[in-house]
Image (cartoon, rainbow, N blue to C red):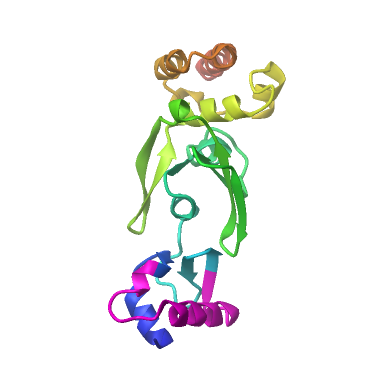
């Protein structure tokens, strides 16, 4: 396969897997050897085994970090600080894309950024939706409420007033407090109940502050 043929085949894909190139009478060893050579030449980015992206200037669409995260680990969704920053609920830029999975925890440093996957039990794996990221890309991302609960659930002392203040939560009117409380009841977690009581207080204080302006 020539590189021009590869670009023609995968040029519309933000990321692609090796399997996309194996249609017809193709030798898997030869494909892997060529991919390795193009990666060394910096024409391709290898994100993990079997997952690649075209490097500039060959890529037509820069892969969104959330789409990459979904493809790095099948059956995962973006959450915690990454989703909270996406919804503008915290002010800081989050350099690592954080995701939730029922598989084992994992972390990758790639040419497209750092990706971390946190494990939860199957019964806590809910509260996400498909989000339009633009440029024809979509990814599964936690709702604002579930992103906050995931972070609190996974963070040691995540229900402490000190930790919740350190998050510098903002725009809390974007949170559906009734939905948040309902999700906590589904989770049946005393830790989450304590945290949501504090967050509710912060939301009411923020609302009162805007009312006084």
x then y, percent, for residue 82: 54, 41
Q: Quadrant of the N terminus?
A: bottom left
The quadrant where residue 91 appears: top right
Q: In this view of the protein, which residue sits in the foreground, 53 or 26?
A: 26
Residue at the far right: name it: 162
Q: Please tell me in which quadrant of the rendered image residue 25 appears.
A: bottom left
At a point 72% along the width and 20% down the height, the residue shown is 162
Q: Position of residue 4 (x, y in %)?
A: 39, 86
- Quarter of the image with the C terminus in it: top right
Q: With respect to residue 23, does 141 lie above or below?
A: above
Vertical arrangement, residue 63 with respect to residue 161, above or below: below
Task: Name the residue: 58% across, 34% down.
Answer: 90
Q: Nearer the viewer, residue 59 or 25?
A: 25
Q: Residue at the left extreme?
A: 24
Is any atom of residue 94 visible in this view? yes
Q: Is residue 211 magenta?
A: no
Tell me residue 30's x, y (percent). 45, 83
Which x, y percent locates residue 160? 68, 17
Residue 35 lies in the magenta-colored region: yes
The span picked out in magenta is 19-45
């Amino acid at each position: 396969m020539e590189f021009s043929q590869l670009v023609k085949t995968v040029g519309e894909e933000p990321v692609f897997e090796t399997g996309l190139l194996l249609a017809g009478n193709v030798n898997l060893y030869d494909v892997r050897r060529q991919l390795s050579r193009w990666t060394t030449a910096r024409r391709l980015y290898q994100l993990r085994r079997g997952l690649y992206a075209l490097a500039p200037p060959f890529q037509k669409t820069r892969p969104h970090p959330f789409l990459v995260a979904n493809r790095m680990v099948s059956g995962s969704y973006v959450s915690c600080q990454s989703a909270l920053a996406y919804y503008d609920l915290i002010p800081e830029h989050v350099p690592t894309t954080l995701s939730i999975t029922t598989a084992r925890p994992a972390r990758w440093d790639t040419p497209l950024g750092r990706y971390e996957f946190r494990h939860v039990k199957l019964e806590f794996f809910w509260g996400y939706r498909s989000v339009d990221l633009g440029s024809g890309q979509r990814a599964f991302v936690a709702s604002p409420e579930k992103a906050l609960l995931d972070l609190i659930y996974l963070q040691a002392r995540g229900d402490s007033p000190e930790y919740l203040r350190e998050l510098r939560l903002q725009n809390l009117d974007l949170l559906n407090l009734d939905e948040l409380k309902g999700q906590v009841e589904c989770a049946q977690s005393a830790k989450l109940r304590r945290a949501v009581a504090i967050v509710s207080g912060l939301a009411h204080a923020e609302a009162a502050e805007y009312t006084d302006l």
